[in-house]
Image (spheres, helix red, strand yellow):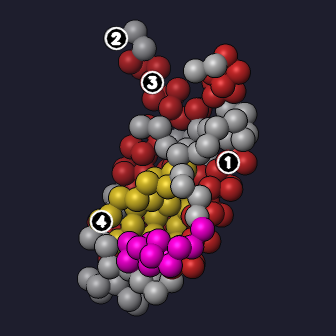
Amino acid sequence: MSEAASTSTETGQAGAIEPRIVAFVCNWCTYTGADLAGTSRIQMAPNVRVIRLPCTGRIDPVFIIKAFERGADGVIVSGCHPGDCHYLAGNYHARRRFTVFREIMSFLGIDQRRITFSWVSASEGRKWGDVVNEAVARVRALGPFVGYRSLVEKPNAGA
Ligand code: FES
């Protein structure tokens, strides 16, 4: 790594690196919508790694914290629109859980602008492209998320 890149990564300067974004998506709606975006050749930033889960109700908020610990600069959580969950109420549970969990994440020092929640159906490939591009632009403007990682890494530094 060059000295300039190293310095900018350590200081967290905006725009210094390409952001790494992890997307936790439900299998039935958003994953299919993301697939549609790909097959429709919708232009999207290549910064997102998709992790498919059965339902947003299965997305434990700890997954988000772990993603940041492991190097993500941003996270997207997306599933079926309210009323469309294939398990009936999984997305309602997820919405309630994340409403509460937002405050805990803020307390942990996680900037809420790094987390994007959205509903994307199987037919909304274009919307998925918009969600991805907007999240990448927002996180790129914030810069790399070194603050949280360094907090997590310090306890092990002397081990
Ligand atoms: Fe998509 Fe539940 S199956 S949110």
Quote the CA–CA distance across marks 1 and 3: 23 Å
The magenta segment is 30-43
User: Which residue was labeled with disc 1?
Assistant: 140
Disc 2 to disc 3: CB gap under 8 Å: no
Pair 4/2: label in front: 4
Find out whether residue 1 is within the magenta segment: no
At numbered mark 1, what does the secondary structure look like: helix, strand or loop? helix
Disc 2 to disc 1: CB gap under 8 Å: no
Quote the CA–CA distance across marks 4 and 2: 34 Å
At numbered mark 4, what does the secondary structure look like: helix, strand or loop? strand
User: Which residue was labeled with disc 2?
Assistant: 159
Residue drawn at (51%, 83%), measured in percent from left and top? 124
Amino acid tagged 1: Arg
Q: Looking at the figure, which quarter contains the N terminus?
A: top right
Amino acid tagged 3: Glu
Amino acid tagged 2: Ala
Quote the CA–CA distance across marks 2 and 1: 33 Å
At numbered mark 2, what does the secondary structure look like: helix, strand or loop? loop
User: Which residue was labeled with disc 4?
Assistant: 53
Quote the CA–CA distance across marks 3 and 4: 28 Å
